[in-house]
Amino acid sequence: MPVIVIVSESPEKTVSIGENLAKSLKAGNIVGLSGELGAGKTVMVKGICKGLGYDGAVTSPTYNLINVYSGQPEIFHFDFYRLETLADLVDLGYEDYFYSDRGISLVEWADRVPEAMSDAVISIEMEIVSERKRRIRIYSRGDDYDC
Ligand SMILES: Nc1ncnc2c1ncn2[C@@H]1O[C@H](COP(=O)(O)OP(=O)(O)O)[C@@H](O)[C@H]1O
Ligand SMILES: [Mg+2]
């Protein structure tokens, strides 16, 4: 899998990386994000949402597992932090979102349920380097992604 490694120096830079990545996405795509608490997954999701033309509130759906943001395409923002098994996700009906042709799925804590992520087009791993620096590894499936 091709990989791009970028060091982001600020939350604003992470948002702009997300905005650029959004240009390569289309309905039906699944994007996984991983990295410890505070690594910047939600900041990156905000940037992707902005790049997709959504300018409403974006918050980690830690308790409800999914937030749906309306738009064209719709955005399905997942947070797998509290999930332990694929069965919990199946109960939620996640496949209806993942394999919908109406929207794009953005999944925080994707590594909690890796079995669900086999069709992800992009995996983003975020790592804290210092207070404002984040090392971001972007694995894409074949295509070139512009960051
Ligand atoms: N370069 C950076 N990129 C992203 N976030 C950063 C960066 N530097 C500092 N931060 C801060 O780190 C925190 C990341 O929070 P959040 O995106 O909610 O993390 P996560 O969703 O991974 O738990 C925010 O408070 C953000 O302002
Ligand atoms: Mg988050």
Image (tube, rainbow, N blue to C red):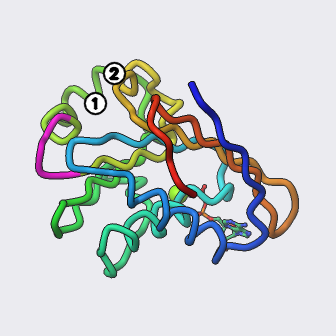
Q: Secondary structure at mark 2?
A: helix
Q: Which residues are magenta?
A: 99-103
- Amino acid carrying label 2: it is Leu
Residue 34 horizontal/vertical position (percent) = 58, 41
Which residue is depicted at the point 28% across and 20% down? 87
Q: Amino acid at mark 1?
A: Leu
Asked whether disc 2 touches disc 1, contact meaning CB atoms under 8 Å apart, the reply is yes
Whether the residue carrying mark 1 lies under 8 Å from ligand 2 is answered with: no
Question: What is the x, y in percent for residue 137?
Answer: 67, 42
Residue 112 in magenta stretch: no
Residue behind mark 2: 86
Residue beneath the point at 73% across and 53% down: 6
Where the N terminus falls, by quadrant?
A: top right
> Which residue is under mark 1?
89
User: Residue at the location (76% across, 51% down)?
Assistant: 135
Chief secondary structure of the magenta span?
loop
* Left or right, 124 with reference to 54: right
Q: Nearer the viewer, residue 37 or 63?
A: 37
- Measured from the top left, where is residue 51 in percent x and y? 39, 70
Q: Residues within 10 Å of mark 1 (few under 14, many from 20)?
A: some
Above or below, 90 relative to 133: above
Between the residue at mark 2 and the residue at mark 1, the CA separation in whole angstroms equals 5 Å
The 10 Å Cα crowd at callout 2, few under 14, some 14 to 19, many 20 or more, is: some
User: The C terminus lies in which quarter of the figure?
Assistant: bottom right
